[in-house]
Amino acid sequence: MWVDAIGRTITYLRISVTDRCNLRCVYCMPKDGLQWQPRADQLTVEEIARVVATAAKGGVKRVRLTGGEPLVHPEIVEIVRRIAAIRGIEEVSLTTNAMLLERLAQPLAEAGLKRVNVSLDTLNPERFRGITRGGDIRRVAAGIAAAEDIGLTPLKLNAVVVRGLNSDEILHMACLTLQHDWNVRFIELMPIGNIQEWGDGFPPPDARYVSAKEMLTSLSVLNLQPVSAPTGNGPARTFRIPGGKGTVGFISPLGERFCENCNRLRLTSDGKLRPCLSAVEEISIRDALRAGKPLDGFFRQAVMQKPAHHEMRIAASATSRRGMSQIGG
């Protein structure tokens, strides 16, 4: 069992399977995209499975697959199948923009995927197209429906709240939980590679941040009641609208740090362990993987390098050299 320097037990691994994405969300990457990693630099299915097998021996029980957009990976179903079969892994989940989820929900579920989180920052089709620079919200809706039909639940909808972009929609989005057994979660904008100008029509850097406290205040009309967090809800503070089927959550890495309960490590698609989302430090394990060397020592190093807290600030420059799509949000 891996325990870090301040006593946190590590049971959760987030794996970015690719840095590629089929959208260009304004808070995630530049309009023209980024220079993709060469395929040869990215971990193979077999290599990902070896990493997870090592992690499972160290006490990791839950794995979440991210990107980029994980569903653009041509072998995503096989990745899920291999991880789900590893002894000690109790749950494999995935975060997606859902653009490809309609056709992949069933094969993913059959491979062993248990749950999906869907990134959805607006319910307005035109605004969605603008935020994502070309996305079609109808495909997202179809993906959500397919995930529910096949049992990839409880379903979570994640919205990054930005003033002047979508902050006027959180009441409407929260009310989705009245009729749907969804976990709608509002997330504070983090300064991870997104502090540049986003272009005409979008808010400037110093006007974007909305705290979870302000979000809660704006939803006071709903009389939200605190509830125990659903399984896998991570650091979200969770509430329910009286009589509602689902829950409303708030993730506040800046306004209310939750680092004292962090139980995760991250693995980038090019084979680097990250002790913290905002950390500059990365531990490369790709060469060791390809040389057939043991990985336990690299994991122990990453665990012991976990900081007591992150260094993100509301009005600060980005704290990582990589953007969110390159790290695996």
Image (cartoon, grey):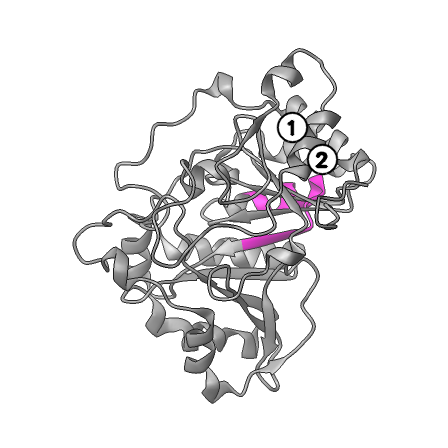
Residue appearing at x 72%, y 15% in the figure: 293
- Which quarter of the image is occupied by the N terminus? top right
Residue appearing at x 62%, y 35% in the figure: 77
Is 21 situated above or below 35? Answer: below
Mark 2 or mark 1, which is nearer the start of the sequence?
A: 1
**Percent of width and height locating residue 248:** 55, 72
Residue appearing at x 63%, y 41% in the figure: 265
Q: Which residue is mark 2?
A: 83
- Asked whether the residues under the numbered discs 1 and 2 touch, taking CB atoms below 8 Å apart as contact, a structural biologist would say yes
Magenta stretch: give its range. Answer: 104-117
Q: Secondary structure at mark 2?
A: helix
Q: Is residue 49 left or right of residue 285?
A: right
Q: Is residue 1 left or right of residue 209?
A: right
| Residue 82 appearing in the image | no
| Residue 317 or residue 55, whichever sits in front | 317
Q: Which residue is mark 1?
A: 48
Is 110 situated above or below 171? Answer: above
Q: Is residue 177 left or right of residue 62?
A: left
Is 284 situated above or below 120? Answer: above
Looking at the image, the residue that sits furthest to the left is 200
Amino acid type indicated by mark 1: Ile
Asked whether 324 falls inside the magenta stretch, the response is: no
Mark nearest the camera among 1 and 2 is 1
Local packing at callout 2 (Cα closer than 10 Å; few below 14, some 14-19, many 20+) is many
| Residue 145 appearing in the image | yes
**Percent of width and height locating residue 73:** 52, 32
**Percent of width and height locating residue 191:** 39, 51
For the residues marked 1 and 2, what is the alpha-carbon distance in whole angstroms? Answer: 8 Å
Asked whether 111 falls inside the magenta stretch, the response is: yes
Amino acid type indicated by mark 2: Ile
| Residue 50 or residue 256, whichever sits in front | 256
